[in-house]
Image: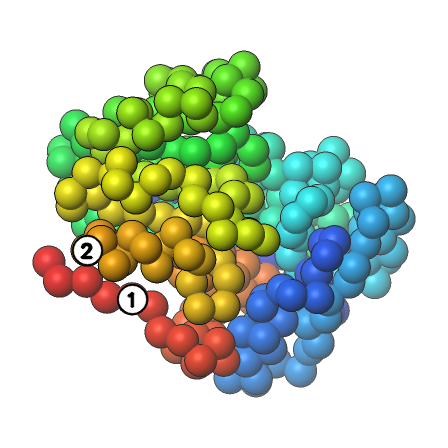
Amino acid sequence: MERPVRAAQRPARLVILGQPVAHSLSPVFQRAALRVAGLSMTYDRQDVAPDRLADALAQLAGEGAGGNITIPHKEAATGLISRCTSLARRVGAVNTFWTEHGALVGHNTDVAGATATIQALCPSDVTDARDRSVVLLGAGGSAAATLIALHDLGYRRITIVARNTARAQALSTRVSIPAQIASMDVVNDVVGAAVLVINATPVGLRDDTFPVAVRALPERCAVFDLVYRPGLTPWITACRHAGLRAEDGLRMLVEQGAAAFETWFDMPAPREAMWQALDAAPPTYRA
């Protein structure tokens, strides 16, 4: 097992960078975690336009700050931060950072968040996972983190479905994880044998569009939507009404945040307090 990544210096303050970022729940549960841990520190939202990201990161390095990076900056940050961990380089996206000796270090905890959600939805050993078919929608930074999580959990029958199949193939090649590639035009056919379908696209973030027709999903298929919205996304609601195990991206959000907290402070994250701050609890399932 790889040694956990830990910051050499605690951040002077914490921020989340994105655009838009006003809706982000990270300050809500991270502030709760800081209170419970007895850490006197702020965690703020910072709306940053893409053309101002380099300046914002440079300023934060000068302040000795740390924090998180969200849409649309995760991939761009890898080329702007002084040093990235091996995992961040492999994913091609940074969502967590801190300052060491005046320079920023970038890391990726989305893999940890995806791993926790997949394990909750599909508890199985590596032998079971190897022969189980998974369909992953998307070929961006979030899809890369999820693909790595799937591979590390032992899944080998993975199909990446994307509008741009060349980008999907490039993702598979870049992270050295073999996968079948399919066009989004045939997604309803591709999911027919899947035990797990994961949406790593923005579909459903701002409208009620379904990434996959619920009727196309096989019985006992589990569903994971990286998108999260108050009261669940319509797709996840429909999947649950159909009797499927289905989660939105809230567990992934909390777990990537917990992993970031542990990286910054080298102490266990107070997950219960983080969930309570969101007036929520992680879903549980019968074996």
In what element is the residue under mark 2?
loop
In the image, is 273 to the left or to the right of 53?
A: left
Eyeballing the image, is 134 above or below 228?
Answer: above
Residue holding disc 1? 283
**How many numbered dots are placed on residues in this image?**
2
Q: Is residue 224 visible?
A: yes
Residue 280 quadrant: bottom left
Residue 161 picture location, percent across and down: 42, 26
Q: Amino acid at mark 2?
A: Gly
Eyeballing the image, is 196 above or below 261?
Answer: above
Residue at 32% x, 55% y: name it: 238
Residue at 29% x, 66% y: name it: 283
Which disc number belongs to residue 261?
Answer: none
Residue 1 quadrant: top left
Labels 1, 2: front one? 2
**Badge 2 density bin: few <14, some 14–19, many ≥20, Cα 10 Å:** few
